[in-house]
Structure formats: C-alpha cells, structure tokens
Image (tube, helix red, strand yellow):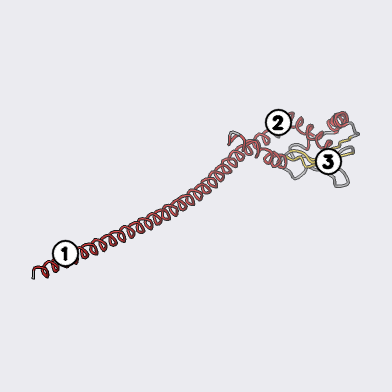
Amino acid sequence: MSGIIGDLDELLAAIEHEGRAEVEDIQRRATEEVEEIERESEGRIENEVREIRASADAEIARIERRHSRRTRRRARRDLLEAREKVLDRVWHRAAEELDGLADEAERYAAALEDLAVLGARILGPGSYELASDRRGQPLITAERCARWSRRATDETGAEVAFEPASEPAEIGGGLLVRDGWRRRADLSFATRLDDAREVLRGRVLEVVTGS
C-alpha cells in the first residue's frame, strides 16, 4: 500500500512540475508577445511621430516660402512706388523750372540755342526751321539763327543753316527743329522731360536701394 501511495505522490509531483513548467512557459510566451506588441506599438508611434513632424516641417517651409515671396513682392511694390514718387517730384520741379526759364528772355534764348545745335547733331547737315512756343518764337530772330547756324556747323563739322519758323509751334516750351521733308527733332520741354524721366528711373532706383 505504501508503494502505491509513494507512486501517487511522485505522479502528483510530476504533474505539478509539468504544470508549473507549462504555466511558466505560457507566462514567458505571453510576456514575449506583450513585449513584441509594445515594440511594434512604439515603432508605429515613432513612425507616426516622424510622419507628423515631417508633415509639419513641410507645412512650415511652405508657409515660410509663401511669406517670403509675399514679402519680396510687397518690398518690390513699395520700392517701385517710392521710385515713382521721387520721379514725380523731380519731374514737377523740373517742369516748373523750365516754365520759369521761358519767362526769362536771355536764359530762354540761350537754352533755345543749345537745343538748336542738338537738333543739328540729331538730324545732320541741312537747312532747318526753328519753331518754339509763343514765348520763345519771338526770340528766334534772323540774327540769332545766323549765329546759331555758325555754331552748329563748327560743332558738327557739317553745313547747317537755321531760320525762324513763320508760326509758333503748339508746344509748352522748347524747340522743334524741322526741314521741308518732314524730318524733325522734337526737343520740346515735355518730350525732353519724358525722355529724362526714363533715364532717371534707373538712377532713382540706385538711390532708393542704396546700390
């Protein structure tokens, strides 16, 4: 009888040992599965964080580029507006000075002489009539035309002859130099100012930008 009981105890001990081993194995596998799940979860979370961060960085960069472009456009617009304001002030001041010049006969006559010679340089040798506005036309006398012709001939190296136009030109000041073949040099103050305005654009831009 004692032998049977001994065998039963051994059997129970063996079953208990096997049970504990099985439980421990189950626990180990469960722990490993949990750790694997945790690692996978951490990996997914890290990937999601990286994706979110990359998306956020891309959006920030896009906003910065858009803001930079907008800033550059605004700066260029402000620069152009500043340039035009400067040009307007210069243009109006020059127009006022030229209008005042036409009221001073001697100075106006000297200016008309310079314009006549410039017209000869532009048109070349020939005979030309000189037409100014109503204030300038009386200053273009035959005597002055003879003197201006000699100067233009000397300075251009070609034969030039000026004569007064029979009627004033419909201009606000300055001079028209023209021949009988419809060749002419428009040296009116308005045209000269417009030409000067275009030349000044680049110079004013340099002053405004400090370049």
Q: Quadrant of residue 94?
A: top right
**Residue 116, how many percent across, how many down?**
81, 35
Residue furthest left as drawn: 1
| Residue located 85% across and 47% down the image | 182
Residue furthest right as drawn: 159
Say if 175 sits above or below 42 in the image.
above
| Residue located 64% across and 39% down the image | 91
Which sits in the foreground, 196 or 141? 196
Give the residue at mark 3: 165
Give the residue at mark 1: 13
N-term mark: 2 or 3: 2
Image quadrant holding the C terminus, namely top right
Which sits in the foreground, 121 or 173? 121
Give the residue at mark 2: 104
N-term mark: 2 or 1: 1
N-term mark: 3 or 1: 1
Three-letter amino acid code at disc 1?
Answer: Ala
Q: Left or right? Give the position of 28 relative to 161.
A: left
- Number of numbered discs overlaid on the protein picture: 3
Neighbours of disc 2 within 10 Å: few (<14), some (14-19), many (20+):
few
Q: Left or right? Give the position of 85 relative to 197.
A: left
Quick one: SS at disc 2?
loop
Can you see residue 143? Answer: no
Image quadrant holding the N terminus, namely bottom left
CA gap between label 3 and label 1 equals: 139 Å
Three-letter amino acid code at disc 2?
Answer: Glu
| Residue located 33% across and 60% down the image | 37
Q: Quadrant of residue 159?
A: top right
Which sits in the foreground, 133 or 65? 65
Q: Left or right? Give the position of 50 relative to 204.
A: left
Q: Left or right? Give the position of 45 relative to 198.
A: left
Three-letter amino acid code at disc 3?
Answer: Ala
